[in-house]
Amino acid sequence: MTATRLIKITLLVLLSIAITEPASGNNQHQQFLPMVSVPAPKAGVAFASHKDGQERVELLGDSVAYWRGWQRGGVAQDKWGLEATQSLWCDFYFHRHHSDGKLIYQMPTVEKLPKNFSGWLLLLNEPDLSYYGKPPQCAADPIRAAQIYSHVRQILPHAKIVAPAATEFDYKNDYEWLGLWWDEVVRITGQPPQVAAWDFHNYLQGGNPLAPYDALESWLNERGVTEPKFFISEWGACSVERMSEMKAAFDADERIVRHYIYEQYGATWDGGACIVMFEGDSRTDKIRLTELGRAFLGLAPVGEIRRDIAD
C-alpha cells in the first residue's frame, strides 16, 4: 500500500466519524462530531505597568489567560479579557496594640476579599531578598512572614494560598529562608504551612529551567510534603532560545499549575532591557512584540531585540 493511499484511507476514516443521522419526526439531520478535550491554559502575565495593557494583551492573544500586578489597598479586577490573580504582595501594615503590645496586622487587600474567597492568593513577593542583603521587595523576616501567613489563613480559610515567592538567592542557599519560615509557622500554628502551591521566581539564564523546582520538591519531600504543586508568579528570559526553552518546560511540567511571564514593559533588568516583550508607545507609535515577545508566542524571529527602550 502506497503512502498516498494510506493517507487517503486515514482521511476517510476520520471523516466517517462526523456522521449524520435523521432526527426523529422530521427530515432534519443532526451532526455528531467527536468531542475534543482542551487543556486549561496555565500561562499568565505579570505586569510591571498597566500602561497600554489592552494593546499588549491583544498582541499576546489567547496565549495567556491570567494577569497579576502590584496593587495596594484593593482587590485586583478581571480586565483585558484576563482573569485577575489576587496578591498580598507588600500590602500589609502593623502596629502595637495599646494594652498588651501585640502586633496588629492590617491587610487592606486581604480584608476586602469575601470571607468565602477560594481562589489563588499570592502571599509575599520575594521577602528573602533582605535576608541575603539585597534590595528588599516585601522585607519580612521569617518570623514576621509566618505571622502574616497565620493572619491571612485565619481571615481567608478557604483561599488557595501560594507560599512566599523565593528567589535565586534562597535557591542557591538550599532554601534557608523558607526553612526558617516553615519552622516559625510550625511554632505558632502547630502544623506545617497549609499552602496550595510553592513559588520560585525564575530568572536563571542558564541550566535546566526546572532545576529550582526539582530542588524545592526534594526539600519539601524531606519535610513530608509529597507531590507539591508550583505556581511561578514571575519568570523571564534574556534570549530567544532561553525564552522558548523556559516556556516549553513550564507548559509541559504537570507540577506547575500556572506560570506568569514578567513582561518588564519599558524597563531594564540587571543593566539591560533583556526581558522586554513589547516596544513602542500607543500615544506616538504602534505597540509591537520584541523578539522575546515573539518567542513567547512561538513565532519565528523577524529582527533584533531593541535595546534602546527608555526606562
Image: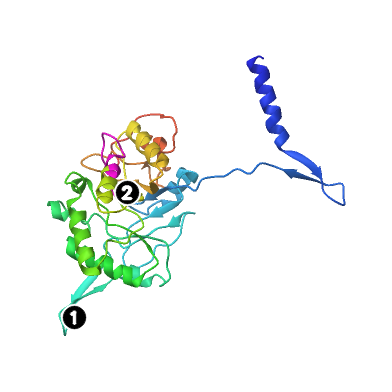
Amino acid type of the residue tagged 1 in the rendering:
His
Q: Residue at x 29, y 57 (%)?
A: 163
> Is 243 situated left or right of 8 in this image?
left
For the residues labelled 1 and 2, say whether their Cβ atoms are less than 8 Å apart: no
Question: In the figure, residue 116 lies in which quadrant?
Answer: bottom left
Q: Name the residue carrying label 2.
A: 234
**Residue 113 spot, x, y in % from top left:** 39, 70
Q: Residue at x 17, y 58 (%)?
A: 180
- Residue 243, compared with residue 44, is above or below; it is above
Q: Which image quarter holds the N terminus?
A: top right
Q: Residue at x 87, y 52 (%)?
A: 25
- Residue 282, compared with residue 15, is above or below; it is below
Mark 2: few, some, or many residues within 10 Å (few <14, many ≥20)?
many
Provide the secondary structure element on which disc 1 rests. Answer: loop
In the depicted view, which residue is nearer to us: 308 or 22? Answer: 22
Question: In the figure, residue 153 lies in which quadrant?
Answer: bottom left
Asked whether residue 229 is drawn in magenta, I would say no
**Range of residues picked out in magenta:** 200-214
Asked whether residue 213 is drawn in magenta, I would say yes
**Residue 264 spot, x, y in % from top left:** 31, 46
Amino acid type of the residue tagged 2 in the rendering:
Glu
Q: Name the residue carrying label 1.
A: 97
Can the viewer see residue 276 in this picture?
yes
Provide the secondary structure element on which disc 2 rests. Answer: strand
Mark 1: few, some, or many residues within 10 Å (few <14, many ≥20)?
few
**Residue 9 spot, x, y in % from top left:** 69, 24
> Is 77 situated left or right of 190 in this image?
right
Question: In the figure, residue 90 lies in which quadrant?
Answer: bottom left
- Single out the residue that lies furthest toward the top: 2
In three-dimensional space, the C-alpha distance between marks 1 and 2, rounded to whole angstroms, equals: 36 Å
Q: Main secondary structure of the magenta part?
A: loop
